[in-house]
Amino acid sequence: MATTIKVNQIEGSTGSTVTVPTGQTLVMTDGLAQGSLPVVGVAKGGTNLTSFTAGDVLYATGSTTLAKLAKGTAEQVLAMNAGATAPEWITYVGSSSIVTTGALDSGSITSGFGAIDNGTSNIRSATITAETAFVPDASGGADLGTTALEFNDLFLNDDGSIQFGDDQDTTLVHTDGTGLTLNSTNKLCFNDASQFVQGSSATVLSIGATDEIDLTATTIDINGTCDISGIATFSAANVTQAALTSTSNAVAWDASAKPNAYHVTTENTTIAAPTNAVEGAFVCLEINYSDSHTIGWNTIFEFAASTEPTTTDTDTKTDIFVFRYNGAIWQEVGRTLNLSES
């Protein structure tokens, strides 16, 4: 039979403990609304908080105090803050961006991570590996190194190139096993654009200067025809002697290749018309007689009084002739006959 007991207060018979016998249940209804209950402190097993929002995280701020952290956003994870005093929400590695600060002490950032945008701060690493390219944020928008932080060595692979200009019109290419190649007819300039070295065509190398090109060396070797359109001044000059031979009683003579020539006689012969004659050129011919051979001259040679000289034609003797080409004939400038061979 149900019995109703109405009291203002229930107290234990001793102390402050109300004992409910084993196997019995004390049910209290009505009169104990939630709002009438006191906030229970942490020391009594409560939170000392009056309300929560869905997703809040409860954490201790001290040995007897609790606090709540509001829920984060999608894909965020809990991490300890920089001072290691409380948890906080951060975006985990693998999301589309990282908006927190800190260091990646170990591990790696894998493919699919997305872009790393750290604003104006620096990215530092012992070695940075690029799979495609390092690029500035805009054309001409960044430098490689600074006036105070210069790089050391630059290594390029075989056939690598340095390309200059917005349209890459000038390139310096590594030609494997040969050297460096400047493209097209571009110039390598010194001091200003008027002083340069240039491959002006596929077969011509041009060297230009405003006033003077100064070559300093013990020996300067020019192999080929030297075409001087201005004035050439020499403190000393030496044109190496070159031999002429006689075949079928005729001596062929290339006046450009052998302007200072000598001929040791082996037969009676005639000095043929020189080839590659240039107007104004001088040539010299030394004739050394190895026997009593006779010498004749092509009609292109003009002598004083239009009279061909009587050569020495005697063994161990030497005759020397000098001619100048006037554009049509070789005019005799001087002769010395009947010299003893030394």
Image (cartoon, rainbow, N blue to C red):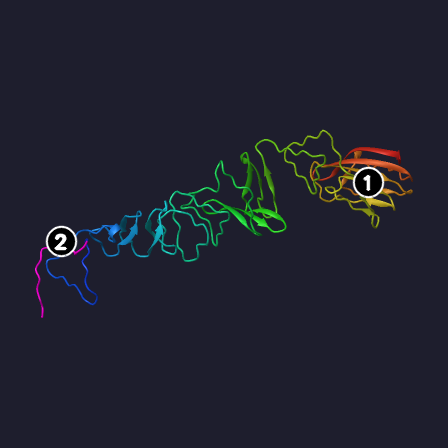
In the drawing, what numbered circle is on residue 262?
Answer: 1
Residue 79, x across and y down, in percent = 36, 52
Query: Is residue 11 a member of the stretch shown in magenta?
Result: yes
The residue tagged 2 is 36
Residue at 87 percent across and 44 percent down: it is: 265
Quadrant in which the C terminus appears:
top right
Report the span colored magenta. Answer: 1-14
- Between residues 225 and 101, which one lies in front from this camera angle? 101
Query: In front of the other: label 1 or label 2?
Result: 2
Kindly state the secondary structure of the residue where label 2 is placed. Answer: helix
Question: Which residue type does callout 1 highlight?
Answer: Tyr
Does residue 179 appear to the left or right of 246 in the view shown?
left
In the drawing, what numbered circle is on residue 121?
Answer: none
Residue 34 position (above or below residue 22): above
Q: Report the residue that reaches farthest toward the top.
A: 235
First in sequence, mark 1 or 2: give its number: 2
The reply to whether callout 1 and callout 2 are in contact (CB within 8 Å) is no
Residue 214, x across and y down, in percent = 64, 33
- Between residues 246 and 96, which one lies in front from this camera angle? 96
Does residue 258 appear to the left or right of 36 in the view shown?
right
Residue 285 position (above or below residue 30): above
Kindly state the secondary structure of the residue where label 1 is placed. Answer: strand
- Between residues 255 and 24, which one lies in front from this camera angle? 24
Q: Using the numbered discs, state the Cα–Cα distance from disc 1 to disc 2 in whole angstroms.
A: 135 Å
Residue 196, x across and y down, in percent = 57, 38
Query: Is residue 160 a member of the stretch shown in magenta?
Result: no
Estimate how packed mark 1 is, as few (under 14), some (14 to 19) or many (20 or more) residues with alpha carbons within 10 Å. some
Residue at 49 percent across and 49 percent down: it is: 128
Residue at 19 percent across and 56 percent down: it is: 17
Question: Which residue type does callout 2 highlight?
Answer: Ser
